[in-house]
Image (cartoon, helix red, strand yellow):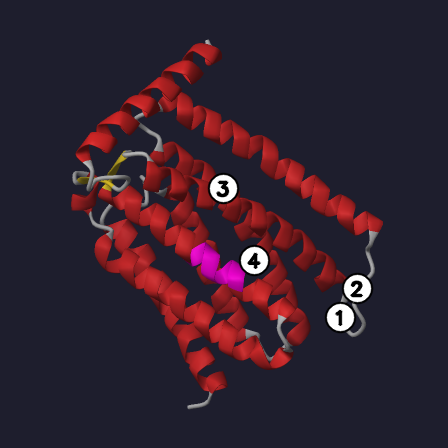
Amino acid sequence: MGIGGFEQAIWYLNILATIAVLISLYRNGLYRNYRRLYIYLLVDTLQSSLGALFQSRRKLYAQIYMTGQAMKLIIAVFVVLELYWLALAGHPALARFGRKTVRYLLPAAGVIALAGLLVDPSAPPGRSPVLHQFFSIEHTMDTWLLVFLTLICLFMAWFPVRLRRNVALYIGGFFLYFFARFSGVLLTKILPASFTHPLSAAMLSISFLCLIVWLFALRRQGEETTTVIGHRWNPARMERLTGQLEAINASLSRLGQ
């Protein structure tokens, strides 16, 4: 099986795995707790399934891709907001601050992306102007979303935030899932065309791994089990950082009054 055949196979496996995760989340009642992730995966499944059906019709495939990606981009913004709220549930003032920051900066990033197209709307030779403009906006927004996902992951890695196990798997899995797709698209634009299929196969393989972890690890019991990531190996430092975190939350709470 050549790289094209492997890429096709892993694409179909991603569709099947996403459907399996959706069913698992529903059967375990977790779709209520993680609604935005559920909607994101549902839209992703619809986009991929329709794309697989009409992949031979290039114009229709491009329309399905752009519509699906636009919808997922909007939903991803709400996923990030949900992640901030879940990760900082024990520190509500800090959670509100994080969500407000995301709400202000992401629309600003969208305006900047649109302004960039007005300044230089031209597409490279041989590339569709519509696709070029769409990819430019998508890449800008994906970059900012990845920045916020990275920040929340770094925050959890540094501060001893106590999380439900499912929440930790949700955050870590979505970061890796989103990072794989972002990196694949970015490297495809930078590297020669000969790298397109290997990069796509690698990206799909990583997203498939994330889906498999979610499929088997996200369970009802994970709502009752908690974990701490940051500095769990150093109790003294963990206690000091917990005090700092409480002080930051208290300060933001006073500012918000």
Q: Position of residue 134 (x, y in %)?
A: 69, 57
Q: Which residue is mark 2?
A: 123
Other residues around mark 4 within 10 Å, as few (<14) / some (14–19) / many (≥20)? some
Q: Which residue is mark 1?
A: 127
Which secondary structure, mark 2? loop
Q: Are marks 4 and 1 in contact (CB under 8 Å)?
A: no
Q: Are marks 4 and 2 in contact (CB under 8 Å)?
A: no
Q: Which residue is mark 3?
A: 148
Asked if the stretch drawn in magenta spans residue 202, the answer is no
What is the three-letter code of the residue carrying label 4? Gly
For residue 68, the mark is 4
Give the extent of the magenta segment.
177-183
Displayed quadrant of residue 11: bottom left
Q: Nearer the viewer, residue 54 or 220?
A: 220
Q: At 30% from the left edge and 42% from the top edge, which residue is drawn?
A: 167
Which secondary structure, mark 1? loop
